[in-house]
Amino acid sequence: MTKFRKLNRPTGHRMSMLRTMVSQLVKHERIETTVAKAKEVRRLADNMVQLGKEGTLCAARRAGAFVRGDDVIHKIFTELAYRYKDRAGGYTRMLRTRIRVGDAAPMAYIEFIDRENELRQAKPPTPPPPQRAAVDPWTRSRLTRQYAPPKEEKTSDSDS
């Protein structure tokens, strides 16, 4: 796997915690946690939605090896895959909320976007740029040349 934040935990505890948090995020579609954990959960949750969009048996086994619960796997491969079929990425949003009282840790909500009761509405997708007509390289080269303006003849008014 790629580099993760260590979150001050041994590897087994950290991976177990992240698996549980991703499963709870899929189940409830919004959880509150610390900012550092939310950033890690966001990476993994986006990965699970991507597997759900693939929809293959291999993707289902990979997702099943990570998340906990058959209902969570079913939701990833049906509801979330259908909801985000036209979206290329960025399925989750992190919103910073408060400072926790006990240890002053910054807290954040992490939630899926494009759902009911979301904390902030998703921005509309940006339209793709218009397609340009194809131009062969020789014509493009001729069009991009900068020509100097023609020289103006110096005429003196005193000769007239």
Image: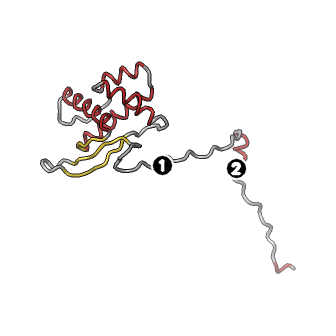
Q: Quadrant of the N terminus?
A: top left
Q: Earlier in the sequence, mark 1 or mark 2?
A: 1
Quadrant in the picture for residue 68: top left
The amino acid type found where label 2 is placed reads Arg
Residue 78 x, y percent position in the rendering: 41, 29
Residue drawn where x is 27% and y is 41% of the image: 31
Q: Position of residue 117 (x, y in %)?
A: 35, 47
Residue at 33% in and 33% down: 44
Query: Residue at 40% across / 22% down in the picture?
Result: 59
- Looking at the rendered structure, which numbered label has been put on residue 33? none
| Amino acid tagged 1 | Pro
The answer to which image quadrant residue 51 occupies is top left
Image quadrant in which the C terminus is located: bottom right
Is the residue 144 above or below the residue 78 in the image?
Answer: below
Find numbered disc 2 in the image and state the secondary structure of the residue it sits on. Answer: loop
Where does label 2 land, which residue?
A: 145
Residue under numbered circle 1:
124
